[in-house]
Image (cartoon, rainbow, N blue to C red):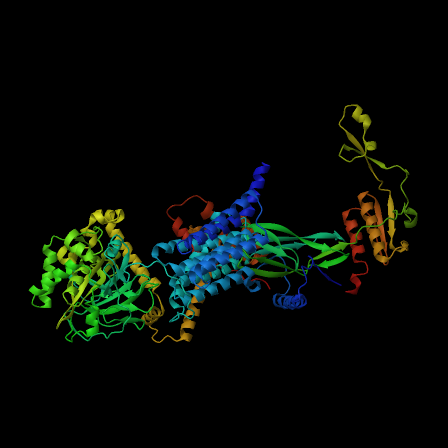
Amino acid sequence: MAAVATAESAGQTLRPLFWTCAVFAGGVLLNADRVPPWALAVALLLIAWRVLTAYRGGGQPGVAARALLAVTLVVIVLVRFHTLNGLAAGTTLLLLMAGLKLLETRAARDQFVMVGAALFLLLAACLDRQELVRAPLYGLQAWLCCGALAVIAAPATAARAALGLAGRALLYAVPLALLLFVFFPRLPGAFWAIPRGDLALTGLSDTLTPGSIGQLATSYDPAFRVRFSGPAPPPQERYWRGPVLHEFDGQTWRRAPAELRPHLPREYLGTAYRYRVQLEASHQRWWFTLDTPTEAPEARVFLTYDDLLVGAEPLRDPVSFDEVSYTHTRITRPLDASARRQDTALPGSANPRTRALAASLRERAGSDGALVEAALDYLRTGGFVYSLEPERLGADAIDDLLFRTRVGFCGHYASAFVVLMRAAGVPARVVTGYLGGEWIPYDGGYFLVRQAEAHAWAEVWLEARGWTRVDPTAVVAPERLRRGILDLMPQELPARARLLHASPWLNELMQRWDAANAWWTNHVLKFDYEAQLAVLERLGIRSPDARALGWAFMLALCLWLAVIAWHVGRSLRPAHADPLARAYARLCRKLARIVPRAPHEGPLAFGAAVIARCPAARTSLLPLLERYAELRYGPPLPDTRAADVEAFRRAVRRWSLPQLPP
Amino acid sequence: MTREATAGGSAGWNPFAPLRTRLDARMAQWIRRRQGSDRLPVRLERRRLYILPTRAGLAFGALLLLMLLAGLNYANSLALFLTFLLTGFALVVMQQCHRNLLGTEVVAVIAPAVFARSTGALQLTLGNTDDIERLRLEAALPRGPLVLADLAPHTRQQLELQVPAPRRGRVRIERLRLSTAHPFGLFRVWTWVHTDAAMLVYPHPHGVLPMPADSARNAGVRRHAGAGGDEWAGLRPFRDGDSPRQVDWKAYAREAPLLVKEYVQGASELRMFDFAQLRSLDEEARLSQLARWVVDAEAHGERYGLTLPGMQLGPDRGPEHRHRCLAALALFGLEERE
């Protein structure tokens, strides 16, 4: 018995500490993919240690040991990151220092500080990753942190009660949060740029090796989404332009060294496609567009001479932009000499057989256009196979592909075709990007382009036409144009994707999920200064000046506070479901000014108590209370009861206190 | 003359302490003027509740400000939403905290008398006439320690607040503070209750002089016959601490339970305590000595009377008489000046 009592009382004193450890651990885990693994391990170890010593009772390290540990950890962070400024370094440092602080956490104040650290870690996680999947986790962590505050303030609070308290308060807070979210003035730009470090790059890089696109082919992640405001291009025209590569060293294609060339004036032919692209955060600088974009959408994006949109900064956050593209253009000016030199260059004397093939094709073909056709014919009839996992190629990679293995992916064929063209003296370049896109019929309908749809094709310079798109993969595997890569090679897909394709129901679910993600990115994450202005405009505030907004906001705030105050206060008197009880409660409230009803008093005893204080009320009050007693305790009268109760309710409403003697 | 009830030592030297004290006094005056005196029972209304963030609340506010800056700087919607959510949370907490105290009833404040150099217990009764729980209500005298109370719906609870009683006299309980930081401890709402309760502090009962013997002669009252003998009062069951000499051994020998012969020290015993006769002591020591005698005489069931300059009490006995005597000693020389 005594043992139980002590365990229980010990449990009570430890409760805030455990909550503190739990929310701190939550904050640490939310940042698990941002901080280095060793820091994560150290933090979790410190938490485990603190919990264990709290249970078993054991010494904490002394001040000197903690100071030494702190200095060591700071030095390690400095050595690893070379800075303490920046989200990754800052988060790591916060995590380690807070972990150390945990060791000396005893008083409520320390625990409060730890909850503050947990909230900061939550903030860091919010700054770092904003996917829809993580939003519920963030919400949960905020809830736990608030619950921990309740437990720290009152250590006897049970977990359920703490979560109930925190949950209710947070629910009340949601309307205000939404209000502030929409109306709180945003800044048009950052006022303090903190380096945020770079995550692993996703998507296409600025190089192409024969196998590099194949690696993307199994990734089901979205690359970007496109909404057309007019007609969408047919499937065979859905080439999404990414990095254009010019330099070839025999194995790898690269972008040309930064060189400013003029964007060549041209004629745009055919349909103008107007659309809005929503790019995922790729941590790269490519802004993908439909084939040939006409202009740079923003000041921080450049339209290069090879028709690529390149951002000034890597894309750390999702971004949306409007663009107009054409899929056919004509350039009548000749290509200048240096550009021609760049796009006909080949390394040394590699790939002799390819060169020989090029020479023979050149001899037979009359024009450059005929040469392109001849080369495509060669690929079409040469028994070439389209495969995600081709054999490794040797030193003369193109020779190997064209004459030995004859198995390749889009990157292989694009590369071989461009080499062939260059060997024949036709300027050519490799374009990487995406081909296709899945139509998602939700959220207004849009094309979802996944990483798996990464593609590579070629562009050749034809006199009087300019750069012309040629896709050698289209002749090797014509169905690739019409169907997504995922349909084409089911055996190559990861198990997850295969499962999705087997079940239309699951597929639909995935499409809806993507639509939800798109909505989240568009309307929540990208709710910035401009979006805010747009919302205000829709509300009729044309030129929002700070004062009017401030007043409107203050008004809304007061309204919310009043509603909350009323709602919080309402718990004073829970509404009675029974109209009779409600009416009686109302009467009691009126009478409470004379004397409040004691919980044990029945209506008649209460009436006597009131009349003793205020005899003037006798004539009007007594019949009312007697009526209540009759309705409440008398025989049931099913026919007239509802009407009687209503009459009683009216009588109560009319009844007022007689004038009290001064 | 009034003495503020003060408790608790000074916790370290604080350069702002004098300023703080003066500020507190000014605030107290202002609040008293604003609210007036309270007639208990009193229900705590809105206009008398004051609310401010606690230290934790201020820290929480600073945290929110930092989060806001980070969110704005990065134009990060999630961080901003989190900030706004927590801002709303803090405001809701403010309401809940206010609600926790609002409507609480201060039913009674009773201050039983105590002896000097001990600690008195002020009995404060709080009532909750509403359907909500009121948790972690804190009651305290100015600069006194907090006493916590949880009030279930429709209940009352009595709290005891410690009042140090160093000297005899009357300790005015001018005001006491009710507060709460429940839930979450981010805000503290408080109110001052002004009472006219006063705690009587009897003199410290101390003195080594023997009690004056039978004073019948002095008082002119005849003593009852039967000197040296106490009056037989009856038998009662044995209790620990009874003297073996008083045990009725004969009855015990007859296999009766262990009984004690009880004697009342005669109704006839009468002692008069006179302030004027204790010339060898100074005033406070005389009062202490007289208090000692009053306490002892009452404990022995004797009749006694008290003579103070200009005042004659008794002879009589019983708790009422004892209180009258001790009260007279407590206030001797103090109240006239008011």
User: Can residue A192 be seen in this snapshot?
Assistant: yes
Whole-percent x, y for residue B16 in the image: 65, 67
A304 vs B228, left or right, is left
A607 vs A516, left or right, is right
Q: Quadrant of residue A287?
A: bottom left
Question: Which residue is nearer to you in this view: B281 or B113?
Answer: B281
Farthest-out residue, top: B254
Whole-percent x, y for residue B149 in the image: 59, 51
> What count of labels does the image hold?
0
Q: Quadrant of residue A457?
A: bottom left
B3 vs A644, left or right, is right
Farthest-out residue, right: B217
Question: Which residue is nearer to you in this view: A571 or A154?
Answer: A154
In the depicted structure, whether residue A331 falls above or below residue B306? below
User: Can residue A648 be seen in this snapshot?
Assistant: no
Question: Which residue is nearer to you in this view: B177 or A583?
Answer: B177
- Which quarter of the image is occupied by the N terminus of chain B? bottom right
Question: Which residue is nearer to you in this view: B72 or B285?
Answer: B72
Residue at 79% x, 65% y is B337
- Which quarter of the image is occupied by the C terminus of chain B? bottom right
Whole-percent x, y for residue B156 in the image: 59, 50
Whole-percent x, y for residue A128 in the image: 39, 59
